[in-house]
């Protein structure tokens, strides 16, 4: 028996660099599947830690919510060790090439795609703003959204650096995420989880503040 599909959580640490600055960051790595098969959402920083968490299970894909270096640095090594495909929205190729100029992703993510793992579906939602090719993954069977850096507990992802736009992320959150069921648990790229219900009342406040 493969067991019930479940969500596993790993935190890895490293740096994020863009526009000439570098910051220390802790990243959430999400592993979705069962005892036999999993996908990894955002292979961040430490390939050995990600591979240890996957164990002897089949890794069917490394899904990148976007291509900032802290989220994709370890993706090629994880893919090489497991044979998994790296999937990225094409609009983030410009950011990907800054990190891995000699290694292309293996396949595209597109809005509306559904990735299957362990008998459940992960629906791709294109949510640009933090990055042009940012996506979230919605798993209705698990009551879960994997939001990358689009939505956090307490606000939207940062938009003060290259290839980001505040108005776009607010539209993405309002139109694509806050329309999901309120009880949906939001598993973020950094920090604590939240719910759609907890964040939905604050959209107008965020828009008015400009962050």
Image (tube, rainbow, N blue to C red):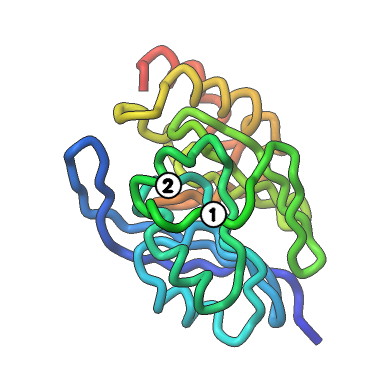
Looking at the image, residue 66 lies above or below residue 59:
above
Label 1: element kind:
loop
Number of numbered labels in the structure image: 2
- In this image, 159 relative to 126: left or right? left
Q: Residue at x 49, y 39 (%)?
A: 92
Q: Which image quadrant: the N terminus? A: bottom right
In terms of depth relative to the viewer, which is nearer, 127 or 26?
A: 127
Q: Is residue 41 visible?
A: yes
Q: Are the two marked residues, 1 and 2, in contact with CB atoms closer than 8 angstroms?
A: yes
The residue that disc 1 covers is: 105
Q: Which disc, if any, is residue 96? A: 2
In x, y percent, where is residue 139?
71, 52
Query: What residue do we see at 63% from left, 73% from top?
Result: 59
Distance between mark 1 and mark 2 Cα atoms? 8 Å
State which quarter of the image contains the C terminus.
Answer: top left
Dot 1: within a 10 Å radius of its alpha carbon, few (fewer than 14), some, or many (20 or more) residues?
many
**Figure quadrant of residue 21:** top left
């Amino acid at each position: 028996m493969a067991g019930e599909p479940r969500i596993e959580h790993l935190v890895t640490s490293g740096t994020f660099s863009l526009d000439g600055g570098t910051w220390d960051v802790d990243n959430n790595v999400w592993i979705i599947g069962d005892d036999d098969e999993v996908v990894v959402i955002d292979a961040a920083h430490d390939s050995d830690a990600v591979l240890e968490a996957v164990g002897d299970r089949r890794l069917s894909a490394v899904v990148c919510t976007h291509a900032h270096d802290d989220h994709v640095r370890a993706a090629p090594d994880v893919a090489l060790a497991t044979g998994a495909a790296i999937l990225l929205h094409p609009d983030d190729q410009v950011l990907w090439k800054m990190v891995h100029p000699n290694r292309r992703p293996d396949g595209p993510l597109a809005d509306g795609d559904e990735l299957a793992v362990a008998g459940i579906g992960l629906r791709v939602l294109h949510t640009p703003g933090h990055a042009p090719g940012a996506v979230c993954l919605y798993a209705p069977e698990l009551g879960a959204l994997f939001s990358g850096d689009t939505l956090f507990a307490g606000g939207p992802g940062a938009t003060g650096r290259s290839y980001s736009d505040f108005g776009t992320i607010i539209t993405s959150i309002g139109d694509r995420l806050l329309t999901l069921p309120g009880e949906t648990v939001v598993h973020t790229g950094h920090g604590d989880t939240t719910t759609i219900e907890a964040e939905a009342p604050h959209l107008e406040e965020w828009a008015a503040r400009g962050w």
